[in-house]
Image (cartoon, rainbow, N blue to C red):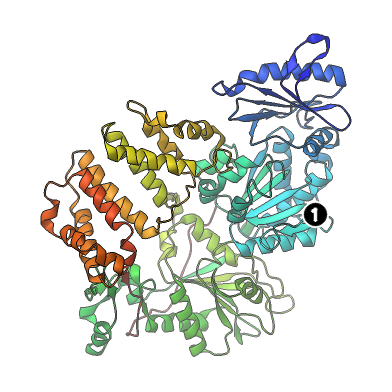
């Protein structure tokens, strides 16, 4: 409500009063188009006057209609001085009466974190206490984000749990969100919080989205789905980000913009490999996390165990397979395989060779797998008086590869308890529990496709088998971390785990022997198809004359896409809302306007139309590529032109489909090479509209997975000394 200050000192746009009649917050609103800080000074003046009148300084909001900023300059942060508060920060909405009351009450309840002891039963190792002290110091002086770099196995989750308890006891937080990228890690975290924080109810949002508690655990994707529906921006006082790295920044940073909370990042990625965007997300300088504890330090201090590495080599894994080198019987096997079909429905030619990169991805050789399995079962670390193979993880390339490994383990030794653990396996979390367990019903060997590469804690693991190449330094050391944990009494009373073995069949140890010279990967930067199509449509529209009907159709389609996104959607970044509103207007797309800047909205989650099947959207993109070539004055790319011709010819073989039969004469026209002479953008547009709903009837091309059983040569494992560990 609007409020007039005492002695006629001004009129506040909005004052939010609490149940006790005191002003909890004010809102100073400026019209759209004004700079966001235009109302700050005036808002602070109003807050001063209200504080004099009511004895309470309100929370300050100021806005220009698109952006909102919050200023709690009386937060009374212990590390700064009496009454000192937080700097102004962007928020995504206004707090409720209860939430405002909690913010104000926290001003007097918040204690200096250095005066609240750490629960050493949860995290009592010296380096863990150092980590907690570093976070306490950073939060205490007004920073709201911190990043801990801790080697795998050093207790990141326990450290985070101890911090939650400390912050809760000190009056800093009440509700906490823990985020991880896998269901198994969410389950593991929820169990750990429940074990150590019995006074703070834990809710696993993957199992109960409507549960009520204080600690909530979720995957990033589930949380993205809940933004703006079940959860408001002030829902959490602290968010913990498990394994904070570049892919989290790229895909899910919207979560951290939406919630107004403290933010703690946890990562095992070596600090030199944490990328710039991740440091920026936590408002830190490159290479300078809040605190760091490396694998080298942990091994030297006796908190993790080192590994012995064995370099193993197979002719096929190293060199691939050439048809000419096979025996006559093996050549017959080769010739009898179904190698797949191309995009035009024709059988693929039998290859003359398969390179090593495709082994265990498209071509599987049973003899190679048989020899690798035998070698690991012979040379791996044993338990139970050396009668049984110790806990072992096989890192494999694909589900087919994993299943073949599992089958051959059972063929080689039926007494070995092995299972494939993948994200889509039935009861994959139950299988992980079986692998963690010991005794009857437990698993000895887990064959993993990505699922066990990071995060899952099984201290009894003593053998890691790299049966796939790894190309990212960060991922390699995370995988090594599956074996580094301590396991007391693993081999009997007083006989602790002192080391673990690494069997490398894909040259990873050599690849990462000197990681100082490995360029960090930034992951795939490919934009989604809808985003790329939107950008190409904008470019084509910008190149066409203002009165071109194709341009008019493009602009209409672009506006229709934008209209499927509500301007209030939490998936629209606040600083893009003004642009979204602008480009929803017809006059924003007129002649002489800068429509290319609309490309910044290409990331938005547009709704598909009723006929927007994936094949249709891919065909749209193909035709846009050809249209853009003409619009730029370039020659048509031959392979794209031939692709359209082949699509038309392939469809002519599908005239048993009534819709295709009705277009047969047109398809025949498009299938002729002469049709392309003098082709125009309008001609291509007609092809696009005619064929986009028919391409779904084309049989997709594929490369078959081929399983052979040909003789391979496997050298005995060679002990190598790693020259570099994670720092």
Q: Considering only vertical position in the picture, is 160 above or below 601?
A: below
Observer able to see residue 262: yes
Q: Residue furthest right?
A: 20
**Quarter of the image where one finds residue 594:** top left
Q: Nearer the viewer, residue 137 or 40?
A: 40
Q: Give the residue at mark 1.
A: 120
Residue appearing at x 36%, y 54% in the figure: 617
Q: Secondary structure at mark 1?
A: loop
Q: Is residue 78 left or right of residue 514?
A: right
Residue 723 position, x and y percent, is 48, 59
**Quarter of the image where one finds residue 668:** bottom left
Residue appearing at x 22%, y 62% in the figure: 648
Q: Is residue 474 left or right of residue 536?
A: right
Residue 713 position, x and y percent, is 34, 81
Q: Nearer the viewer, residue 548 or 640?
A: 548
Q: Considering only vertical position in the picture, is 557 above or below 402?
A: above
């Amino acid at each position: 409500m609007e409020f007039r200050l005492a002695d006629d000192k001004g009129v506040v746009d909005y004052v939010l009063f609490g149940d006790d009649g005191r002003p909890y917050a004010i809102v100073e609103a400026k019209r759209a188009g004004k700079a966001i800080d235009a109302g700050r000074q005036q808002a602070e003046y109003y807050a001063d006057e209200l504080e004099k009148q009511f004895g309470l300084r309100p929370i300050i909001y100021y806005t220009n209609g698109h952006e909102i900023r919050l200023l709690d300059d009386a937060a009374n942060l212990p590390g700064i001085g009496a009454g000192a508060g937080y700097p102004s920060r962007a928020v995504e909405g206004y707090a409720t009466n209860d939430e405002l009351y909690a913010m104000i009450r926290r001003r007097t309840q918040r204690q200096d974190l250095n005066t609240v002891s750490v629960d050493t039963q949860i995290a009592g190792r010296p380096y863990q206490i150092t980590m907690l002290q570093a976070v306490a110091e950073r939060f205490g002086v007004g920073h709201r984000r911190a990043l801990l770099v801790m080697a795998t196995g050093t207790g990141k989750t326990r450290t985070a749990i101890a911090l939650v308890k400390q912050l809760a006891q000190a009056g800093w937080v009440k509700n906490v969100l823990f985020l991880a990228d896998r269901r198994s890690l969410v389950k593991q975290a929820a169990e750990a919080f429940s074990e150590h924080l019995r006074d703070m109810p834990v809710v696993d949002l993957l199992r109960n989205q409507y549960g009520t508690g204080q600690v909530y655990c979720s995957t990033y994707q589930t949380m993205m789905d809940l933004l703006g529906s079940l959860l408001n921006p002030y829902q959490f006082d602290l968010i913990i980000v498990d394994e904070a790295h570049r892919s989290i920044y790229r895909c899910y940073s919207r979560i951290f913009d939406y919630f107004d909370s403290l933010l703690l990042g946890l990562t095992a990625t070596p600090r030199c490999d944490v990328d710039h965007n991740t440091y920026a997300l936590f408002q830190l300088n490159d290479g300078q996390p809040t605190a760091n504890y490396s694998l080298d330090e942990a091994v030297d201090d006796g908190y993790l165990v080192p590994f012995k590495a064995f370099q193993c080599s197979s002719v096929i894994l190293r060199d691939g397979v050439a048809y000419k080198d096979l025996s006559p019987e093996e050549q017959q096997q080769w010739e009898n395989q179904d190698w797949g079909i191309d995009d035009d429905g024709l059988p693929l030619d039998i290859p003359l060779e398969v390179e090593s990169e495709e082994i265990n991805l498209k071509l599987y050789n049973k003899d190679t797998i048989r020899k690798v399995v035998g070698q690991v079962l012979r040379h791996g670390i044993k338990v139970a008086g050396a009668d049984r193979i110790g806990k072992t993880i096989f890192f494999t390339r694909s589900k087919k590869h994993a299943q073949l490994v599992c089958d051959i383990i059972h063929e080689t030794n039926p007494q070995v308890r092995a299972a494939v653990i993948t994200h889509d396996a039935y009861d994959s979390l139950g299988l992980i529990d079986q692998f963690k367990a010991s005794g009857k019903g437990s698993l000895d060997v887990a064959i993993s496709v990505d699922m066990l590469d990071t995060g899952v804690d099984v201290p009894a693991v003593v053998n890691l088998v790299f049966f796939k190449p790894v190309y990212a330094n960060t991922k390699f050391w995370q995988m090594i971390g599956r074996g580094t944990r301590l396991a007391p009494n693993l081999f009997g009373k007083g006989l602790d785990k002192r080391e673990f073995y690494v069997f490398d069949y894909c040259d990873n140890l050599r690849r990462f022997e000197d990681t100082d010279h490995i360029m960090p990967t930034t992951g795939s930067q490919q934009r989604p198809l809808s985003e790329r199509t939107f950008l190409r449509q904008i470019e084509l529209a910008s190149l066409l004359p203002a009165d071109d009907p194709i341009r008019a159709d493009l602009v209409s389609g672009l506006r229709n896409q934008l209209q499927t996104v509500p301007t209030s959607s939490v998936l629209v970044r606040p600083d893009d809302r003004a642009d979204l509103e602008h480009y929803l207007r017809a006059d924003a797309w007129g002649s002489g306007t800068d429509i290319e800047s609309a490309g910044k909205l290409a990331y938005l989650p547009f709704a598909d139309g009723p006929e927007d099947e994936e094949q249709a959207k891919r065909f749209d993109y193909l035709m846009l590529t050809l249209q853009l070539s003409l619009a730029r004055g370039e020659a048509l790319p031959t392979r794209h032109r031939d692709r359209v011709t082949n699509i038309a010819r392939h469809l002519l073989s599908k005239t048993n489909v009534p819709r295709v039969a009705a277009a047969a004469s047109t398809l025949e026209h498009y299938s002729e090479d002469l049709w392309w002479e003098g082709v125009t953008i309008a001609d291509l547009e007609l092809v696009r509209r005619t064929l986009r709903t028919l391409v779904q009837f084309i049989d997709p091309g594929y490369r078959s997975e081929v399983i052979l059983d040909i003789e391979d040569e496997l050298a005995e494992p060679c002990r190598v000394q790693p020259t570099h560990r994670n720092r």
